[in-house]
Image: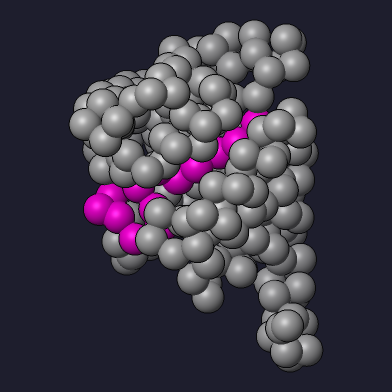
C-alpha cells in the first residue's frame, strides 16, 4: 500500500505531466507512414504488439493516446511516475519487466490481449542496452499469437536526457515522424535460438525505421 504522501506526489506528477505534455505536443507536428500495418488489424478487431525503443516512449505514447493501448511499465520505483502520466493520456498499464516482475507483467499483457487491447512494449527496457531488442519481449506475442509491429521515429529538434537510453523529448514546434514496419509473427514453438534471431532481426528493422525518420525530418542520429 502506498503512503499518502507518496500517493499525493504521484497523483500531482501525473496531472502536471499531462498538462505539460499536452501543451508541448499542441505545437508539435506529427507525421507517420506505414499506418496500414496496424490499422488493418484494428478494423478486424485483432490486437497487436507495438515494439518501441524506450527513448521514444513519450512521443509514441502521445501518438496513440486515448486508444486503450496497454503498456508494460517497469516495477522500479521511478516507473510509478511514468504510469501516472501515460494513464492520464489514455493508456492502461501492467507492471513488470524482463528483469523484475516478469511473470506478473506477462500475465497482465496476455489478459489485456485476450480482452482485445493492443499492447506496447519498450523492447530495450527497463535498463538497456539502448536500442538492443531483448528476446524476452517476444514472449507476449508468442503466447497470444498477436503480431509484432516494429516502430521507429525521428524528431527534427529534441532534448535528450542524460539517461541510459538518452530519452527524447521534442522541442516546441518540432516535427516528429513515426514509421511502422510490417507485422511479424512469433511461432508458438520457437525456442531460445529462434527468439534471439527474431529479436535481432526486428531490432535492426526498428533502427532502420528510426534512421529513415531521422533523415526525413533532418535530425542527427
The answer to which quarter of the image holds residue 160 is bottom left
Image position of 128 with respect to 174: above or below: below
The answer to which quarter of the image holds residue 207 is top left
**Relative to the observer, which residue lies in front, 52 or 45?**
45
**Predominant SS of the magenta segment:** loop
Tell me: 28 left or right of 202.
Answer: right
Tell me: 130 left or right of 141.
Answer: left
Position of the N terminus, as image quadrant, is: bottom right
**Relative to the observer, which residue lies in front, 3 or 153?**
3
Spot occupied by residue 92 in the image (x, y as percentages of width and height)? 72, 48
**Range shown magenta:** 118-131
User: Would residue 51 be seen by someone viewing this image from the given angle?
Assistant: yes
Q: Residue at x 30, y 61 (%)?
A: 164
Spot occupied by residue 143 in the image (x, y as percentages of width and height)? 52, 32
**Which residue ends up furthest to the front in the rendered image?**
189
Q: Is residue 87 magenta?
A: no
Image position of 46 with respect to 138: above or below: above
Q: Residue at x 40, y 54 (%)?
A: 98
Position of the C terminus, as image quadrant, is: top left
Spot occupied by residue 135 in the image (x, y as percentages of width and height)? 32, 39
Image position of 183 with respect to 128: above or below: above
Tell me: 98 left or right of 85.
Answer: left
User: Would residue 157 be seen by someone viewing this image from the given angle?
Assistant: no
**Relative to the observer, which residue lies in front, 129 or 28?**
129
The answer to which quarter of the image holds residue 29 is top right
Tell me: 37 left or right of 159.
Answer: right
> Which scheme is used to colour this image of the protein?
one colour
Q: Residue at x 47, y 56 (%)?
A: 102
Amino acid at each position: 500500500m502506498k503512503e499518502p504522501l507518496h500517493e499525493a506526489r504521484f497523483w500531482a506528477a501525473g496531472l502536471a505531466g499531462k498538462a505539460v505534455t499536452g501543451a508541448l505536443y499542441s505545437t508539435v507536428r506529427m507525421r507517420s507512414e506505414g499506418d496500414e500495418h496496424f490499422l488493418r488489424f484494428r478494423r478486424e478487431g485483432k490486437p497487436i504488439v507495438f515494439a518501441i525503443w524506450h527513448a521514444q516512449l513519450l512521443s509514441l505514447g502521445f501518438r496513440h493516446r486515448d486508444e486503450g493501448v496497454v503498456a508494460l511499465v517497469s516495477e522500479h520505483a521511478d516507473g510509478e511516475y511514468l504510469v501516472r502520466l501515460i494513464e492520464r493520456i489514455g493508456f492502461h498499464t501492467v507492471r513488470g519487466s524482463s528483469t523484475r516482475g516478469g511473470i506478473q507483467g506477462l500475465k497482465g499483457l496476455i489478459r489485456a490481449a485476450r480482452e482485445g487491447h493492443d499492447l506496447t512494449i519498450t523492447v530495450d527496457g527497463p535498463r538497456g542496452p539502448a536500442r538492443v531488442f531483448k528476446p524476452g519481449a517476444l514472449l507476449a506475442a508468442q503466447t497470444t499469437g498477436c503480431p509484432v509491429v516494429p516502430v521507429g521515429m525521428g524528431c527534427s529538434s529534441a532534448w535528450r536526457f542524460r539517461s541510459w537510453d538518452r530519452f527524447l523529448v521534442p522541442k516546441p514546434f518540432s516535427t516528429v515522424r513515426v514509421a511502422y514496419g510490417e507485422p511479424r509473427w512469433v511461432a508458438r514453438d520457437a525456442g531460445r535460438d529462434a527468439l534471439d534471431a527474431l529479436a535481432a532481426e526486428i531490432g535492426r528493422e526498428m533502427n532502420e525505421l528510426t534512421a529513415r525518420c531521422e533523415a526525413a525530418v533532418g535530425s542527427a542520429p
